[in-house]
Amino acid sequence: MSGYVFPRKPYDEVESPFVRDQIRQGSFWDLPHRRYVNELVWLEWYTRDLDRSTMSGVSAFGCAVHHYQIATRWPDAYDAVRQDLDATTRAEFSWRDPDGVDPEARQRWARRHAGEWAAVREDDHRPRSEAETLTDRSDRPRFARFRFPIIPYDTVQSTFLREEIQRGSFDDLQHRRYVNKLVWLEWAETIGQDELSSLYGPITRKWKIAATLPEAFDILMREIGGSTRDSLSLDGEIHYGDIDAEAKRRDLARAWQAVTDA
């Protein structure tokens, strides 16, 4: 099987005004620009055309990850395409929250984490070796996503992340959820890698967080030696089998020109 830099559907069938405008801004023969456009065409296909009822679990997972990676690599373009198609943007991403957690248990864990937060504000911290994965504890309820951190705040190693804790209050739930997403990323890139390699959910979650916090994601990744958005390789290729590649390329060039001339 050979790989060619072709879009998921013909350029002249694209509906998003933003994507059509991006086509007009470059040449079909400008390969980096065509790869970028192809990813936006893929996003429209995923949003508007994909029949999810025919997909296997593995295929659905792969498409979900790719969709979040596009949002991470080109956040503004992602939002523009999704707005064109009346679909949710990054600001509207939802996190599934469980219900029915005992209020007393929530308050008990809140007191514990508030103490850790205060320790960070006093520039006190413990080594990473003491950073237990709290979701593994049998006595910890399944709280709403990012209400509390996945590891104790005072075991966080990133200087940037500790500064983000220090500049806000634990009682500010919006800021705390932001911090907890970054705590989760540090965990995922360090002590949580074994879980990431074996479960679909955490991999998808990583790119979903990256898409909603792109600048913070890059700062944190650079600090802990992870891959930033610039290193994310999205090649805009669709793989075909036995086809006439040159004829296909000529047809796509004509479709690109049709959009440009429209």
Image: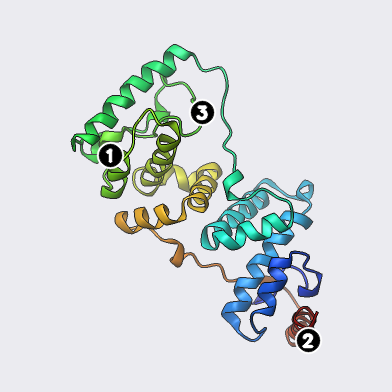
Q: Nearer the viewer, mark 3 or mark 1?
A: 1
Q: Position of residue 248 (x, y in %)?
A: 77, 82
Residue 4 sits above or below residue 90 on the image: below
Q: How many marks?
A: 3
Disc 1 to disc 2: CB gap under 8 Å? no
At mark 1, the secondary structure is helix
At mark 3, the secondary structure is loop
First along the sequence among labels 3 and 1: 3
Viewer-closest of 87 and 171? 171
Please indicate, yes or no, whether residue 237 appears anywhere in the rendered image: no
Q: What distance separates the C-alpha of mark 3 from that of mark 1?
A: 23 Å
User: Dot 3 corresponds to which residue?
Assistant: 144
Q: Position of residue 240 (x, y in %)?
A: 72, 73
Identity of the amino acid at label 1?
A: Gln
User: Dot 2 corresponds to which residue?
Assistant: 247
Identity of the amino acid at label 3?
A: Ala
Residue 102 sits above or below residue 239 on the image: above
Viewer-closest of 55 and 41? 41
Identity of the amino acid at label 2?
A: Ala
Q: Nearer the viewer, mark 2 or mark 3?
A: 3
Residue drawn 57% across and 21% down? 99
Residue 186 sits above or below residue 151 on the image: below
Query: Within 10 angstroms of label 3, few (less than 14), some, or many (20 or more) residues?
Result: some
Query: Within 10 angstroms of label 1, few (less than 14), some, or many (20 or more) residues?
Result: some
Residue drawn 31% across and 32% down? 152
Residue drawn 68% across and 55% down? 82
* Position of residue 79 in the picture relative to residue 138 (left or right): right
Viewer-closest of 160 and 32? 160
Say the numbered circle drawn on residue 3. Answer: none
User: Dot 1 corresponds to which residue?
Assistant: 166
